[in-house]
Image (spheres, rainbow, N blue to C red):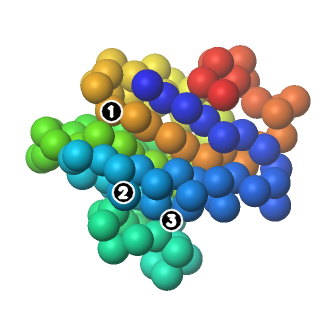
Amino acid sequence: MIKLYIGGKGSGKTKTLIELVNNAAATSLGSVVCIEKGDKLTHEITYKARLIDTDDYAVTDAHALYGFIAGILASNSDITDIFVDGTLKICGGDALALEAMLKNVETIAKDVNLVMTVSIAVEECPEGIKAYA
């Protein structure tokens, strides 16, 4: 299942994501992963969740993010939840590439809750992205 939180900067998406990550880490019987660009969530996310900075792995576009998520899923079958903060920023601001990536991720993340934040005005958002909101 893919769920997107869409909205402009300062609309509370990251705060909501932090709550969701920490709740999932407290209740999950498997592994919880949180992916971000930079390290701003280091003190906000519980140690029970795996926090990964895409800058450490040169993930700079939607294609690389897809491969990164696929690799994480391939390496650990116990993952129950993946959270991605700043998805559009990780994808280099390319909303159309993000739209295509979401379709591809949907095929491999069938048994995983995948939650992403996307900083874009709803009226500027392609329909393929809105479908996951």
Quote the CA–CA distance across marks 1 and 3. 21 Å
For the point 81% across and 54% down, the residue is 11
Query: Could you tell me the amino acid type at mark 2?
Result: Ala
On the question of residue 6 being in view, the answer is: yes
Looking at the image, residue 22 lies above or below residue 132: below
- Residue underneath mark 2: 25
Query: Could you tell me the amino acid type at mark 3?
Result: Lys
**In the image, which is nearer the foreground, mark 1 or mark 2?**
2
For the point 64% across and 18% down, the residue is 131
Q: Determine the secondary structure under disc 3.
A: loop
Q: Earlier in the sequence, mark 1 or mark 2?
A: 2
**Cβ–Cβ below 8 Å for labels 2 and 3?**
no
Q: Crowding at label 3, few (<14), some or many (≥20) Cα neighbours within 10 Å? A: some
* Residue 55, horizontal then vertical, whole percent: 41, 69
Quote the CA–CA distance across marks 2 and 3. 20 Å
Q: Crowding at label 2, few (<14), some or many (≥20) Cα neighbours within 10 Å? A: many
Query: Could you tell me the amino acid type at mark 1?
Result: Val
Which disc, if any, is residue 112? 1
Point out the image quarter for the N terminus: top left
Q: Determine the secondary structure under disc 2.
A: helix
Q: Determine the secondary structure under disc 1.
A: loop
Which disc, if any, is residue 37? 3
Looking at the image, residue 43 lies above or below residue 29: below
* Residue 85, horizontal then vertical, whole percent: 55, 55
Point out the image quarter for the C terminus: top right
